[in-house]
Image: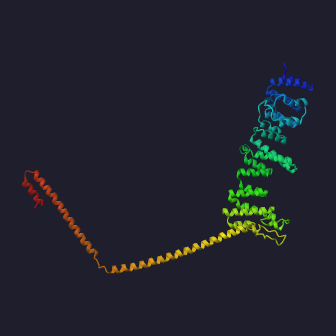
Amino acid sequence: LATAVHCELLKTCYLKLNDVNMAEKTSSLLSKSLTSATCTSLVSNLLHSPLEALAIICSFEAPHAVESLKIHGSILARASPRETAGIVISLCDGVYSPGALASVGERRKVTSDVLRELLESKDRPQTCEMYPVHFFSTAFMENPKLLRVILAHCSKNKRYLTSSLKRTLLELTLEEWSSAKRSKNILLEKTRRDEAMAILSDPQASARLGDYEALVIVQQNNFVEGEILLYEKLQMVPLLVDKYADEGTYKARRKMLALCRSDPEILGDVLGHFVAMATDRLGNDSLKEDDESVDSESELGELLQDVKEALQMARSQKVLPPVRIARILAGDGAGQFRNEFRVDENQKGEGVPLSVALDYIGNVLDEKGKEIERLQSDVEEYNHMCNAMEREINELLSLSNIKRSGTTSKINNVPDINIDEMYSKLLDNSFETKQNSVNERKSEISSEEFWRAMGQTEDRFGTIARFFAKDIID
């Protein structure tokens, strides 16, 4: 006959009497007899006291607790954020049970032990279904730090996160990284940096996170390492080169040279960045005279050695014309080569020392000299061939003139021939030949006809007289 309200009042009385066992038994009986609508109604009636509402939720079965947190989670998280987060994490991990968070109902106060224990626990048995964290994420919108803790815990334990929650986790992590960097909290900065890089380096990050969306987030927070990682993944070589140039370290310069080997088209940009770095460091007033040598063991000497290696690569690849390389080495045409031994200490030139480019320029000049010699020999050979062809043509022309003169003399000795007379004779002969052939053919036909008629007729005299009249027989 007891209703849910009666059971709840009984449980509250047991809790006030510090009788935890009876309170748990009452909660189990209450949870078995309640529906989702009843549970939600009970929590709604206790929202004026969020701690009591949390105590009620902790006595519900997992499905009822989830429905209650979906509806009233934002109010409870605003009043008791850490305790609510502990319940959410237990539901996401599948370790929630009505008696697991008995301290909430017993103490009626928020403690940090519950959340810490849930975050640090590893081998707890599963007691309910694992619920996705997006059921409860909206409840912690006003508490981004706690939301990041929940999302980071779920991500670490391979729980399902939607794409938007993945990006939210990355953004919140970078915000804390940026804040720790400004406050010079080195330990927290390193921790958040490692977490952000782990999110970006996830093999499934491209599908779940979105490379371009992640790039926008890291650019907004000026997270250079994340930008470089995404530029490498997206093959944005020009932007990647710019980031390496901004970093300016020895490792970054080696990566720039490695990119030039795979993509020779960017060699001009890389060489320009190297020259700009060298110009900035050569303009340092505290620089010693020996440091400007390419053989120096200083940081500038290593940079000049990288410039020299880039020039060797340009010579082997033969993609950039030497004129453009010379302009880049001179400061993109705005200046001239620096003198290796400065006359004026206050003088600030542009470009790199001439000794750095001397090998490249010497090799280019040697190659161009050899090419000029080869072209000269080709021109001379072509000239000789033309002269030989001209002589041969003249010889052929002289022979042709001789033959033409001999033919003309022979033509003059030939007697005249009357073509018209010869043609008329030919026509007469052909007509006579034709007439004779016609007559012969006519006599053959008549003879055959005469003898055929003589064989078929009885009046032979009459037949002879008829053929004689036709002048067929003589």
In this view, 423 is above or below 210? below
Quadrant containing the C terminus is: bottom left
Residue 50, image x, y percentages: 88, 33
Residue at 84% x, 22% y is 3
Asked whether the viewer can see residue 319, the reply is no
**Which residue ends up furthest to the top in the rendered image?**
1
Quadrant containing the N terminus is: top right
The front one of 208 and 354 is: 354
The front one of 357 and 455 is: 357
In this view, 259 is above or below 166? below
Residue 397, image x, y percentages: 44, 78
Residue 355, image x, y percentages: 75, 68
In this view, 415 is above or below 221? below
Q: Could you say which quadrant of the image residue 467 lies in?
A: bottom left
Q: Could you say which quadrant of the image residue 112 lies in?
A: top right
Residue 46, image x, y percentages: 87, 30
